[in-house]
Every structure is written in C-alpha cells, then in structure tokens.
Amino acid sequence: MDSLDLLGTAASAMDAQRAALDVCARNVAAAEAAGRSGHFERLVPQFDLHTDDDGTMVEFTGAHPERRSSVDIVTEMIAVMNASRAYEADASLFDVGKTLAQRTIDMGRLQ
C-alpha cells in the first residue's frame, strides 16, 4: 500500500466520522428545541461506497430520518462517543502514514 493511499484513506475516514458527529449534534439540538411537546425524528447518517480510479471510497450522502419517533439523548451520546473514538483511531492512522512518508523521504535523502 502506498503511504499516500494510507493518508487518503485515513482522511476520508476522518471526514466520515466528522459527518456522523455533525448529525448527532443536530439530533440533540433539534430534540432540545422541540421540547417535550414537539416531535422530531432522529436523523441517521447515510454513507455510500463508490469505486473510482483511486479505489473504493466512502461518501457521506446525507442524514435520513430513522423510523423511530423520538431522539434519545443517551443513544446520541453513545453515537458521539463511538464516532469520537473512531475519529481518534483514524487520526492515529493518519499520523502513522505521515511518519511513514517522512521516513521514506529521509531514506531517499541518505542515498
């Protein structure tokens, strides 16, 4: 695997987790704004896989309402924690790829 592919994959995954966090934040904000008397359907992030010349990529296609009737704050916080941890893992992967690319450049300078 090319180190630049690794960086692109990690960056794409970080974008996906950022989009998932954004949907969770919108759910919590809308649920709080609706209050007890209002009704708001929980949005769920949707992602599609597509293949182009560079390989398979994940693309955020928007947030669609879930079939349940309301937003549960605990469920949203769990989703936020999961997305946050996945983002941290993706950021670590990006750092590994960056270090790998830098060491490859350094090896080229020594020769």
Image: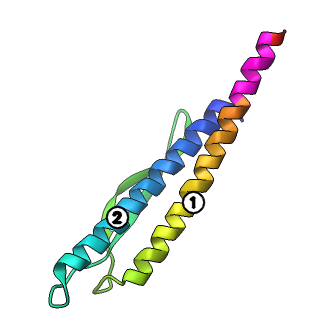
Circle 2 sits on which residue?
23
Q: Position of residue 99 (x, y in %)?
A: 70, 33
What stretch of residues is rendered in magenta? 101-109
Q: Position of residue 43 (x, y in %)?
A: 32, 71
User: Looking at the picture, does residue 28 appear above or below residue 56?
Assistant: below
Circle 1 sits on which residue?
86
Which quarter of the rendering shows the C terminus? top right
Give the CA separation, mark 2 to mark 1. 15 Å
State the predominant SS element of the stretch in magenta.
helix
Which quarter of the rendering shows the N terminus? top right
- Considering the numbered disc 2 on the image, is that residue within a helix, a strand or a loop? helix
Query: Residue 21 has which mark?
Result: none
Which residue is painted at 23% across and 78% down in the image?
32
Q: Position of residue 6 (x, y in %)?
A: 64, 38
Which residue is painted at 43% across and 58% down in the image?
47
Instruction: Report if residue 50 lies within the magenta region.
Output: no
User: Looking at the picture, does residue 95 appear above or below residue 26?
Assistant: above
| Drawn side of residue 63 relative to residue 57, left or right | left
Q: Position of residue 70 (x, y in %)?
A: 29, 85
Please say whether residue 48 is visible from this viewpoint: no
Which residue is painted at 17% across and 80% down in the image?
34
Inspect the image, locate mark 2, and give the three-letter code of the amino acid beneath it: Val
Look at the numbered discs 2 and 1 and tell me whether their residues touch, using CB distance below 8 Å.
no
Single out the residue that lies furthest toward the bottom: 37
User: Looking at the picture, does residue 93 appear above or below residue 54?
Assistant: below
